[in-house]
Image: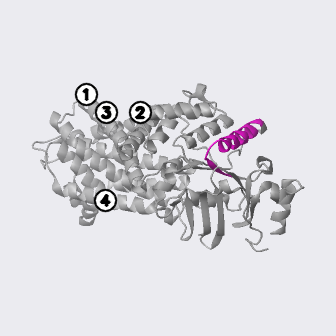
Amino acid sequence: MIYLTSLVAIIQREALRYVNQRERFIAALVRPLVWLLVFAAGFRAALGLSITPPYQTYITYEVYIVPGLCGMILLFNGMQSSLSLVYDREMGSMKVLLTAPLPRWWLLICKLIGGTVISILQVYTFLAIAWLYGIKVPWTGYLAALPALMIAGMMLGALGLALSSFVKQLENFAGVMNFVIFPMFFLSSALYPLWKMAEAGRVLHDICAANPFTQAVELIRFSLYRTGNPAALGWTVLATAVFLALAIWGYDPARGMTRKQG
Amino acid sequence: MSGNSLTRRPQYGEHDQVTALTVSGLTYHFGAKTALKDVSFSIPEGRFCALLGPNGAGKSTLFSLLTGLLVSKAGTITLNGHDMRRSPRSALGDLGVVFQQTTLDLDLTVTQNLTYFAALHGISGRAAAKRIDDVLDRMSMRERAHEKTRALNGGHKRRVEIARALLHQPKVMLLDEPTVGLDAPARAAITDHVHSLCGNGDLTVLWATHLTDEVRMSDDLIILDRGTVLLHDLAGQIAGTRPLNGVFLDMIGASS
């Protein structure tokens, strides 16, 4: 019972904090909308897309990048919530969480689920705006995407959590974020399909294919069109497990999460 | 001076002998630096024990170990009969903590902060609401229940944190320099309040400080310096006929 109570409380706390930071909500939406409404519109003519699964017809570039931008929201939010973890740790409220009489792995998973739920709310807000803009997927696709968004959000959140356990200070974390977010985003299928990358070079294509963010984006893309993608699902789940294991190890008290204070 | 040479057990009446917190042979290193060296003491149930030491004595490290934020391979911590390493969840369930820094969520109200904490201890719904009312009454903070904690002054924030630490009815409460940054009246009020909490029940308090005026002569007193326990006795016994501050300064001066 205490497991469920704590999970609900942690999700509520994340949601309350979020409601209190409306700028954060708007900022998180502006970023993908700029990509969709400005960048994609500009590149529409330059980038031709052939018919590849899960699409059954020619699509415009705007339609192509919507799943990638959903992934972008999850990626930035995953990093943002781990940034708030580093902040929490510096400010001390992380101590309140970690001294609760619950296993640490559970507390970390609760944090992850809390952050992911908030991210998903943002993704659906973005999808609603995209719908108004004319980019529509089958309505059941919006439902089918929910588990995919959950897994992708957990994977990216776990990555942020793992990073936050190894980066001790807030200032350093901003640098780490730039080194993680941008390569992860640009070396993926979020903005261009993998076969386009293959034209640019085999190595680049392979790096993009191995990028867990690519797998997460493909998982979202396929599920939005109600198509299964077991490979993307498998890789995303595996990456989630690896990042989560790293985070749990990183937050192990025997490793000394809180450094010397006097 | 050898670290434990002056340590002696305080003499209590026979009814006081149930131990709430026992620390035995606790050692902790940060890399090559030894933060705590063979620290041992025990505090009987219902006592107020002051942990006095200058800055850098190892008080915060000891608190991190007592709260399970750090784990040491050398030594044991037993809290209300629960070994912190073997059954940390049972031990933490009996422990209330007030950290040195404010650990409240400043964007949330007093009640929201307390509700969140109650849930982390498995208390929800009406039971949580009742306990929140009780602890806020106990700390005279009921009328502030719906204010955002950011709007509270330092003394009131501390009271909320103490209320929060009492919410799950712990057996032992740890306070790490809880009066840091407070003005003199707020400091005196908080010190008095926690002493009174200890006086009328089975709550045991370990209060870390570097200020001797927060210690009463009837309190237990542990003097910690450079990671070792210099002395553990009743404060009145340690002070004798002299002011406690002078004795404390002499001791930490003598050990350097």
Quadrant position of the N terminus of chain B in the picture: bottom right
Residue on which disc 4 sits:
A241
Residue where numbered disc 3 is placed: A125
**Is disc 1 placed on a helix, strand or loop?**
helix
Q: Residue at x 84, y 65 (%)?
A: B253
Which residues lie in the magenta part?
B185-207
Q: Residue furthest front?
A: B14
Place of residue A191 in the rendered image (x, y in percent of width and height, measured from the top left): 28, 48
Mark 2 belongs to chain: B
Identify the amino acid type marked 1. Leu
Could you tell me which residue is drawn at 55 percent across and 32 percent down? B134
Q: Amino acid at mark 4?
A: Ala
Which residue is the site of mark 2?
B125
Q: Are marks 3 and 1 on the same chain?
A: yes
Q: Gap in Å between the C-alphas at discs 3 and 1?
A: 11 Å
Circle 3 packing at 10 Å, graded few (<14), some (14-19), many (20+), is few
